[in-house]
Image (tube, rainbow, N blue to C red):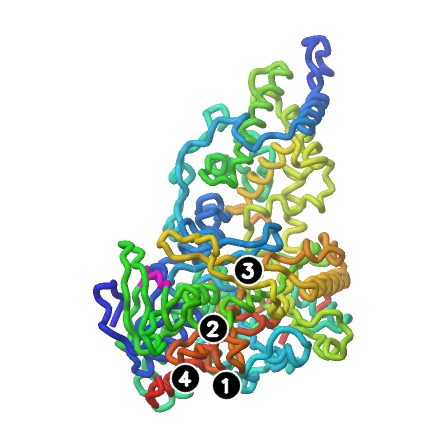
Amino acid sequence: MPVISPEETQPSYDAVIVGSGAGGGQVAYLFAMAGIKTLVLEAGRMFDPTRETAMFHTPNMAPLRAERTPDKQYGFYDASIASGWDIPGEPYTNAGKEEKRQFAWWRQRMIGGRTNHWGRVSLRNGPYDFEMATRMGVGHDWPISYDELAPYYDKVEMLAGIFGASEGIENSPDSSPGVLLPPPKFRAGELLAREKAKTLGIPIVPVHRAILTKTQDAERLPKILHPGNGKAQRLLAENMRMRAKCFFATDCHRGCSIGAAFDSMTVFLRPALKTGNLDILPNAMVHEVTVNDEGRATGVSYIDKVDGGEHHVSGRTVVLGASSQESVRILLNSRSRAFPDGIGNDHGMVGQGLTDSVASSLSAQIPALENLPLHNEDGTVGQQAYVPWWRAADQLAGKLDFPGGYKFIVSSGRKMPRLSTGRSFDSLSEAEGIPFGHQLKEEARRYYGSFIGIGAQGAMAANKDCYCEIDPDGVKDQWGIPVLKFHWKFSDDELKQVADQQRSMRSILEVLGGRVSRSYEDDPLAGVKVGGSIIHEVGGAIMGAKRVESVTNKWCQVWDVPNLVIADGATFPTTADKNPTLSIMAMAWRAADHLIGEMKKGNV
Amino acid sequence: MARSEKNPNRSPQRIDRRTAIQWVSAAAATFPLSRGDSFAAAAPSATGYGPDPDLTKVYQPGELWPLTFSESQRTLVTVLSDIIMPADETSPAASELGVPDFVDEWISSPYQDQKPDRNSILKGLDWLEEEAKRNGVDHFVSLDAETQLKICQDLAIEAKKDRRRFPGSFFYTLRNLVAGGYYTTPEGMRDIGYRGNVAMVEWNGPPQEVLDRLELKPQE
């Protein structure tokens, strides 16, 4: 079974999956390996990371020095095609007028979804992150505990290949022995920051990322991941042997032709296609889950973006992994006699509980790092060091004035220059005017790579001001599908957290002797990044223990439609101070395991 | 050394350059520059490369959309580029790395984001030619190197005072494009000290001499 067109779909599938990224790809992989006849519908085109990525190209080989344009909103070489915050013909609306009342919605219309341009940071939620309401009195608890998800974190980490270390940090869980790959050595700036931050009691440890720092153990891991399934073991072993280890160059956002960095196509869909159990239908814009009179899902309706035609495909089960807000949109647009307000929306909960990482940043020039002997600092290009949340105990004891933790990503070193490099030394220059000529060249050599940047990302609990709905004014996209309207407002909790982020980042940069850029302790609303801009948004169809306050049960099944499962971040009741992707994959694995069991029992 | 000092009576209507820059700056402050095309030729009509370009291809300026510079503008930008990023014992001048072509590509872009830069650059090039005439020659490139440099130094000072006010804003924009265009070439990257973008078998972290400089212990 292969990549197909609408005419080539089977009359019915065991499972129809909407979306091919972290959630949909994970479920497709597991279903195909389990012998379940599966169709994946993807709203964008196929993309082959082995042939279509320009890993070593320098910016002078691209239009406009590879800077961002409306066509390539993360830069020319980013492995995102037909994707972005603003896609022609695919609008969404915002209720708020001010910049910080807006929500920016990134859509990734291509096979593999957002796993193509992700920084690959892969952190587990900790035990506290599942019980924010109980511990902090805000937002919702998850209906599952960390212990229930931990085995799935281990499995995802073994399958995807995650580097990192086990540091024994409170609420930043260690992986089981033999699961993680070795972390890369720190760069000079990261080592210096670690030494200096120690004096403040702030830990800087290796981050976890989905990059192979050594080749995967194709003998051992397939047997652990697919016990008793010889075919799955063979196909996974074969796929693991096709992935090379990192060659310590080039940004993962460009895509990885050697398969060292994780993406859904490379890790999930390539072996899944070889099972013969998976069809992939690209360019299919799903807008509705269809149901029968008993309220069971029967399949999905979609528009073929190639010819604009409306189609339907049937499935015994339906899995939504379209990205959190796209899945919410599909639920809300699935109106029927059984579900007049959209599927799962009997209590008005679909669209509620939208959250995102609470983010701000700060940087400084560090005189100690000037004029360091020249050396290659690429490493695993991008993040290598991070500060896990280190004050969980203080927070629980009521010593902090905000409820959610945060983490810092620390970046340093001489990175590949970009267009802005030419103006990045102005504030340091000793010239009477802006520097140019021989003076600029000399100052650039002195200062280049002497900066340390810190990016903070923190937890967010659901609040009543952050949600989405179908645009009440009837705005539709170019396919005639009703669009989402977002409502967004940072609460005092988030703003106090941002002020604290700024204070802590400043303290680290100052102990490094840095010349610190403008910070926002006093004006956190100006410092906080726009909602959605970190592309970590989750929620909107949250899981819960009770029907009235959630959309799905603890197995990500929509309460009233047990053969409809949500496999992306829409089910997350809160945003933790960890990046969501690893949790999306672990949750999707757990949901898929349960659904396979239910299918075997004949319950769905 | 400005010409006015040499030949104070040659042109009684001439004002000195610094005064001219200040006048223009003051006027610009009073009448904020329009973001429209009032000072510059309309951008050539073209579309961008679209949402799904071939990422693996190597693109040349002028390939995706038509360029703008006339011969004399190109000559002028070439001279300015080499004043902004001159050759020295370790690296070539900007013009040897194709930077003027990049500046032309940038200001000819069909995207809105580059339009203010287009207006600023084209208006600034005109201003420099006027400035050359005030110095008694037809073209900036005909001025002696010392005068050219002096004009740029004055513009750089204005840019530092207020990078949004013309003509300092012009020089700020041009400097950004030339220096940024320079450092995004392999030769420019080498000059600034970037040593990456090379496939490696292992990554061993910083070398010992770096650790010694920072008084750091070796990593495990």
User: Mark 2 and mark 4: span between their CA atoms?
Assistant: 27 Å
The overriding secondary structure of the stretch rendered in magenta is strand
For the record, the magenta segment spans A282-287
Residue closest to the eye, A80 or A531: A531
Which of the 4 image quadrants contains residue B178? top right
Task: Sort mark 1 into few (<14), some (14-19) or many (20+) by Cα contacts within 10 Å.
Answer: some
Query: Foreground: A12 or A590?
Result: A12
Chain ID at mark 1: A
Q: Which mark's residue is nearer the viewer, 3 or 1?
A: 3
Q: Alpha-carbon neighbours of circle 2 within 10 Å: few (<14), some, or many (≥20)?
A: some
Measuring from the top left, give residue A433's x and y in whole percent. 71, 36
Q: Are marks 4 and 3 in contact (CB under 8 Å)?
A: no
Q: Chain of mark 3?
A: A
Residue A532's disc number: 3
Residue A375 numbered mark, or none = none
Where does the image place residue A154, in percent across and percent down from the top left?
Answer: 50, 83
- In the rendered view, would you say B111 is above or below A12? above
The label nearer to you, 2 versus 1, is 2
Residue A151 numbered tag: 1
A197 vs A488, nearest the viewer:
A488
Residues A124 and A459: in front is: A459
Q: Which mark is residue A346?
A: 2
Who comes first in sequence, dot 2 or dot 4?
2
The tag earlier along the polypeptide, 4 or 3, is: 3
**Crowding near the residue tagged with mark 4, few <14, some 14–19, many ≥20 C-alpha atoms within 10 Å:** some
Earlier residue among tags 3 and 1: 1
> Residue beneath label 4, please?
A593
